[in-house]
Amino acid sequence: MNLSTGGMLFNSPDDIPIDEIVHIEIILYGSSSRLALNITGRVVRRSDKEIAIKFTELDLDSFIHLKNIVSRNALEEEKILKEFKEFSLDKSVKD
């Protein structure tokens, strides 16, 4: 799986059509807790093996947890913040 603050790419045998709205739940487990990130996205690309989803809606708490996951795994925090700014601007234009 390839995960960013703007979307994800993952292996899937499912035949989900392009432009389909999907609801994603990313579950994080700790030693004594469980946290679910609830995200809405749109299928933007697919192949026989992979599906690419662009995130379209996520609450602030989910974004903060997602940002922390991504930034811990990719030492490009400025790029991550830029992605969120672009995501926020894109949302404000569409709303």
Image (spheres, grey):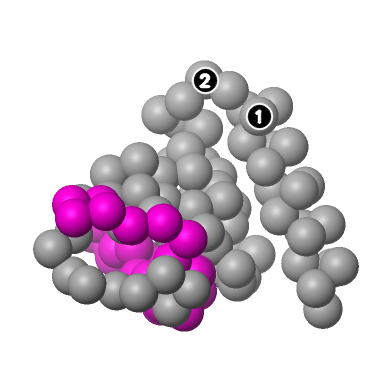
Compare residues 6 and 60 and report the one nearer the observer.
6
Q: Within the image, what quadrant is residue 24 found in? A: bottom left
In the rendered view, would you say 36 is above or below 6? below
Of the residues tagged 1 and 2, which is closer to the observer? 1
Q: Main secondary structure of the magenta part?
A: strand
Residue 67 drawn in magenta? no
Task: Give the magenta range.
Answer: 21-50
Q: Position of residue 80 (x, y in %)?
A: 63, 36
Q: What is the three-letter code of the residue carrying label 1? A: Lys
Q: Residues within 10 Å of mark 2 (few under 14, many from 20)?
A: few
Compare residues 38 and 31 and report the one nearer the observer.
38
Q: Residues within 10 Å of mark 1 (few under 14, many from 20)?
A: few
Q: Quadrant of the N terminus?
A: top left
In this figure, which residue is indicated by the disc labeled 1? 79
Q: What is the three-letter code of the residue carrying label 2? A: Leu
Number of residue marks: 2
User: Alpha carbon of mark 1 to alpha carbon of mark 2: how far?
Assistant: 9 Å
Compare residues 40 and 93 and report the one nearer the observer.
93
* Picture residue at 13% right of the left edge, 63% below the top: 13
